[in-house]
Image: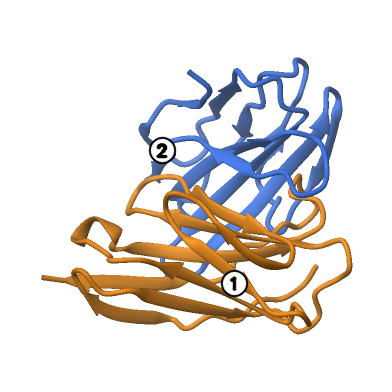
Amino acid sequence: EAQVTQNPRYLITVTGKKLTVTCSQNMNHEYMSWYRQDPGLGLRQIYYSMNVEVTDKGDVPEGYKVSRKEKRNFPLILESPSPNQTSLYFCASTKAGVGETQYFGPGTRLLVL
Amino acid sequence: LAKTTQPISMDSYEGQEVNITCSHNNIATNDYITWYQQFPSQGPRFIIQGYKTKVTNEVASLFIPADRKSSTLSLPRVSLSDTAVYYCLVAGNNAGNMLTFGGGTRLMVKP
């Protein structure tokens, strides 16, 4: 089954404790993105990647890092989480090309105390 | 990236047809129009996409006038399970570089 998976689905952590949220897709898509969703603010793009070893900042990249060492994986790293990074995070992947659609993962709900 | 404007919310009743209109006055020649549906705490899900005129699939229809400055998502005979947020996106390349979801339209279907 074609899908985007994220782990963990739920995470409670404390300020400053490094964490990684994994994202994996099995559709051989070139493009992958991370979004965060907060009440009243909609979905905002954090980082995106157009291929292996190619990443760029989205709308709200501060406090986040990403890497794309393999085509299928695109982890999101919070080196020193802060309470304002409490949010619902979504990973998405897309096939390269004009007019292609995004496939989203199930989401990761993060609480930073 | 073309900015989109949608109504914040809409109410409907089961069995009715719902039409949600999205304005995108500065759409570019190579932009496609895509609609997504999102349920609470789930990732957005693709509904339909079009470039011009009319597109229909098993879930919805998408109407795009000749000037392409707006589009209308039509959901026939909605049910309670269609209660969700609907997003309209306009982009030539859906891969990234500031692909932005607007606030969406919150559709509430009542019994």
The percent coordinates of residue B76 (x first, y second) are: 35, 66
The alpha-carbon separation of the residues under discs 2 and 1 comes to 48 Å
Establish whether labels 2 and 1 are both on one chain.
Answer: no
Return the residue at label 1.
B63
Who is closer to the viewer here, B23 or B100?
Answer: B23
Which residue occupies 76% across, 24% down?
A68
Q: In screen coordinates, is A1 left or right of A23?
A: left
Which amino acid does the dot numbered 2 rest on?
Val
The hue used for chain A is blue
* In this view, the mark in front (2 or 1): 1
Judge whether B36 appears above or below B53 on screen: above
Which residue occupies 86% across, 70% down?
B28
Which residue occupies 58% across, 67% down?
B88
> Could you tell me which secondary element the residue under label 1 belongs to?
strand
Q: How is the image coloured?
A: by chain
* Chain in orange (letter): B
Which amino acid does the dot numbered 1 rest on?
Phe
Classed neighbour count for the residue bearing mark 1: other residues with Cα under 10 Å, few (<14), some (14–19), many (≥20): many
Q: Chain of mark 2?
A: A
Q: In screen coordinates, is B29 left or right of B19?
A: right
Q: In screen coordinates, is B20 left or right of A46?
A: left
Q: Is residue A1 visible?
A: yes
